[in-house]
Amino acid sequence: MACRKNAYRGMVEMSEHLEKQREEQARRREDLERQQRERWTPSSLLERCCTQWLAHGPHQMVLSGPSSIMSSTTYRGCSGCAKEHPKIALAFDNGTATAELSHGFDAFVQYFDGLREATRLKTLRYKLGGDLSSHHEALKSKFGRHLVTIDPKALSASKRHYERMLEQDDQKQAVKRQRTLGEAAPTELLDSILEICYNNSLRELLDIADIAWMRTSSRVIAKYAAKMAMDRMSSIKLTLLPLVPKRDEHPKCSIFGNFEAKGRRHLTTDLNPNDCGSRWRCNDGVFTMAVENQDEIWAKISIYLERKGSTIVEKDILFGRLNRLEVLKYGINTSPFHPKTGGDEIEWDAPSQTQQGGEFGTLQGECEFRCDSEEYRIDVTSVQFTFTDLLGVYLRIKLRQAKEDYMLSPVRRPADKAYIKNLAESARMAPGNAGSFRGMFGWDRVYGTQ
């Protein structure tokens, strides 16, 4: 008897639950109908159309709930009915982009009538200016992707046509500028103009690549480019990190492999206005190490560009999310050592990874062997890091970023392509080559994970 009562109670509760669900679904349908009537006017046109299609598109399953395990399944959208299903059809033919409305809803008509790039050809048909892909994205965001249709081939054709139009406009502008060029401005006037610009915001508007290109221009322009180059060099901070072989027979895992760091040292600079460069001094560049094999590299020395303390305008491009960036690396052994006249110390120089063989090394120092401890005392005195070196670092990072932005851009402008070409040519002229910084700290974003 008790079992029958429990079964009856369970059926009643289930019936009540199903009734509540039906009431809730009916209420939701009423709310949806009311919202659609408010949005899609006139009402006489809406009566012929499917409100489920206008709101959600084709029939689809939707999961709702705090998690996939505890979620409930609901369905929305049109599962197929005899009513009309409005759409905006985008097309591109004979160099013309068009939009055709299947229904004259006020929301559709008001959007296109208020669009500056749209011209009405006839009722419910518009001619669109600009790139079709930008209109496609805007319409999907405004009305939903289910209400906008387009052939992928039309998108590609419109993109190619728009890029050709931009290229022709650039050529016309170049011809127009060539016609309007008159006599060169007097040197004194150009000097005064550049001085005013330099003392205001010119230094912030130009980047390292722009400054380098200015240095190859006229004498007056090159003079102010040299000033801006010196400003960039005075706004960076460099550190030196020596690495020596580990003496522990069972070395622990380290980011430096079989080498251990001897402590990071800060570098100070002597700016040289003649070559827009500088020689950086290491006031505490002394470290010791034991050498067992004379033929092997004795030590490694890395130069880092530090984010902390640097006020350079291009900080975000150079560092990204990093605190420092390795810009030079050296390997020291017996080959570059030269005996010092009249003394036991040895002078040495070491080339960086951006230098060619046979060049005088940009890292200088002294070396002395201590018999009592059977160690070498290494003193790093200076390292050369000029604006040209900074340019090479910046160009290789900027070139990769510019290529990525160009590939992701919906419209590839000829001016952007020319800019990338100029960056690539400048990078080839900079110290080193395309792989000079491979494997160095902070360069995974350029070369990819090793």
Image: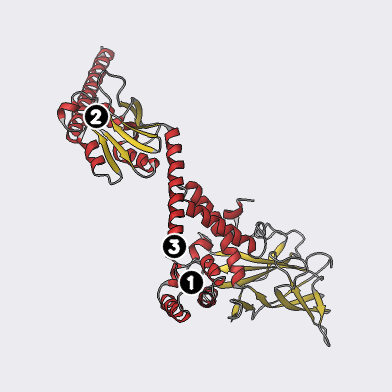
Residue 160 x/y as whole percent:
46, 42
The three-letter code of the residue at mark 1 reads Thr
Determine the image quadrant of residue 114. Answer: top left
Residue at the image position 45 percent from the left and 58 percent from the top: 175
Residue at the image position 42 percent from the left and 37 percent from the top: 155
Residue 441 visible, this angle:
no
Whether 50 is drawn above or below 228: the answer is above
Whether 29 is drawn above or below 213: the answer is above
Whether 45 is drawn above or below 173: the answer is above
* Sequence-first disc among 1 and 3: 3
* Sequence-first disc among 2 and 3: 2
Question: Does 362 sit left or right of 186 as displayed?
Answer: right
Determine the CA span between mark 2 and mark 3. 50 Å
Determine the CA span between mark 1 and mark 3. 42 Å
Foreground mark, 2 or 1?
Answer: 2
Residue 303 visible, this angle:
yes
According to the picture, the residue beneath numbered tag 3 turns out to be: 179
Determine the image quadrant of residue 197. Answer: bottom left
Q: Are marks 1 and 3 in contact (CB under 8 Å)?
A: no
Foreground mark, 1 or 3?
Answer: 3
Q: Crowdedness of circle 1 by 10 Å Cα count: few (<14), some, many (20+)?
A: few
The three-letter code of the residue at mark 2 reads His
Instruction: Specify the label residue 300 is tagged with.
Output: none
* Sequence-first disc among 2 and 1: 2
Question: Does 408 sit left or right of 97 as displayed?
Answer: right
According to the picture, the residue beneath numbered tag 1 turns out to be: 311
Q: Crowdedness of circle 3 by 10 Å Cα count: few (<14), some, many (20+)?
A: few
Determine the secondary structure under disc 2: loop
According to the picture, the residue beneath numbered tag 2 turns out to be: 103
